[in-house]
Amino acid sequence: MNIFPIILAAGKGTRMNSSLPKVLHLIGGKPMLQHVVNSCLQLSVTEMAIVYGHGGELVRNTVSNKNIHWALQEDQKGTGHAVAQAESLIDDDSTVIIAYGDVPLIQADTLSLLAENLDNSTLSVLTTHLDDPFGYGRIVRNGDGKILSIVEEKDATDEQRKITEVNTGFIAAKGSDLKRWLKQLKPNNSQGEYYLTDCIALAVSEGGTVEAAVCNNPLEVQGVNNRIQQAELERAYQVIKANELMLAGVTLLDPARIDIRGTVTAGKDVSIDVNTVFIGDVVLGDNVTIESACVIKDSQIARNTIIKAHSNIDSSIIGESCDIGPFARIRPETVLKANAKIGNFVETKKSTIGVGSKVSHLSYIGDTQMGENVNIGAGTITCNYDGANKFQTIIGDNVFVGSDTQLVAPVNLAKGTVIGAGSTITKDTPEGELTLSRSKQVTIKGWKRPQKAKKNDKENS
Ligand code: UD1
Ligand code: CA
């Protein structure tokens, strides 16, 4: 079957109250339209069309894919008019699926079902049952349950408005049939629009049969018109993602308090505490533990590592059995080798921390290559920036840096170096020696602390 999806995405989305086109609003960190495109791509389609209008260029640039043909709908004259803009792209013997760009949770399986229905019908409609069907097109069936037409809320009789089976907007039909029906659409309804839904009655009038694929999960076919509905679908999406993780062997201490804006791939017996946010592509090895309120973006974390509460990790590679945080900030291009430790209020950037090395408290390590079993004392700063350029700090194996030290880059601490606390190191240090820069401690004997003048003295003066 040669499936050709046409995604309608020209609507203004006035109720979003936004300067961003509606279909570019995010669910799970990804534009809604991208979700729909991805579901279509899962059907192994080679090409698809998107009907766009409002916010045109931005939509085209954001959701780019070489398999997408773009059809401009300048004026929004209805769903039938929208599909007609893509007419020249439709192959007669293709199976066309019409989808909406603002229905982000639609699944590939459901689209497949819709297309497969055409094996024994002329037109296939995706419907769902709603307790409150207000606003939707109603599925009108005859006494035998055969679908006769779809009638829009505004055009429906009181009797028809009681129907709870509604049109989701998704339909499938053979290309040649669809093109023939599109030519016959007329805007003779209460909204003066070309209704795609009129194709149903046209198919029936030609003696065709219309089959419904009923979607039992209304959220999957729910559209987004305002930010309340967007938030509702965001939560529904997060439930799906959380369930996937739990079924893959991850413990979520509260599945309602995790946010995945991208892809999390996790090994066995990973544990994630509440309020952690994952962004982009994150890979977690076996037995990784993530405490509460961390933000982890585009990073790999190898097995047995623990990320303690309130840590932030971005575009970094964390080795196995590392210990990070609480309150650590691991910035892009950090590489932690196995058994490294990064403690509280430590920031790293573009640095490699060698096997078993420790930066336990209150430090900044940037543009640094650190060897194995190094110990960096509290409050150590690599001064990697002179206001114009960045410079490297090299720290050999088994170096011990005393607390409150500044390493002014470029600088190289040879292996086994010991730096005395409170030093400002501006020159390379020799292997295995103690180096320090510190002014001599003096004691002023008999020095008296200043005292406040007495109240009476003040008044007399
Ligand atoms: C449409 C259906 C209705 C169905 C409902 C489901 C018609 C006539 N009615 O209603 O039966 O229950 O969807 O949500 O089809 N769009 C365009 N160009 C246009 C008009 C719409 O691209 O000129 C796009 C919108 O961006 C949106 C989709 O088509 O993605 C649906 O449009 P919308 O106005 O929300 O649907 P309704 O007319 O309310
Ligand atoms: Ca409309």
Image (spheres, rainbow, N blue to C red):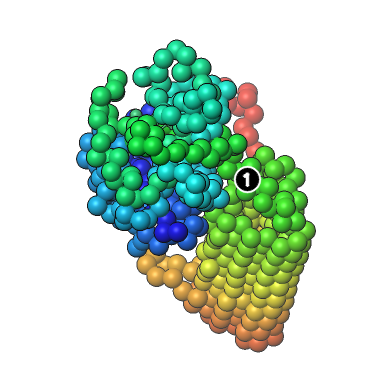
Amino acid type for the residue under numbered disc 1 = Ile
Q: Residue furthest front?
A: 207
Is residue 330 visible in the rendered image? The answer is no
Q: Nearer the viewer, residue 145 or 453?
A: 145
x 65%, y 38%: residue: 451
Residue at far top of view: 158
Q: Residue at x 71, y 69 (%)?
A: 320
Residue 296 seen: yes
Q: Is residue 272 left or right of residue 334?
A: right
Q: Quadrant of the C terminus?
A: top right
- Furthest residue in direction bottom, as rendered: 431
SS category of the residue bearing label 1: helix
Residue at 40% over, 25% down:
151
Residue 83 x %, y %? 31, 43
- Where does residue 360 sit, x and y in percent of width and height? 70, 62
The quadrant of the picture occupied by the N terminus is bottom left
- The residue labelled by disc 1 is 240
Q: Indicate which quadrant contains ligand 2.
A: top left
- Say which residue appears at 46% left-offset and 74% top-offset: 391
- Is residue 246 shown above or below 163? below
Disc 1: residue Cβ within 8 A of ligand 1's nearest atom: no
- Quadrant housing residue 136: top left
Question: On the rendered structure, is 393 left or right of 98?
Answer: right
The image shows residue 291 at horizontal and vertical percentages of: 72, 51
The quadrant holding residue 8 is: top left
Near mark 1 (Cα within 10 A), the count class, few <14, some 14-19 or many ≥20, is few
Residue 152, quarter of picture:
top left
Percent position of residue 115, x then y:
48, 49
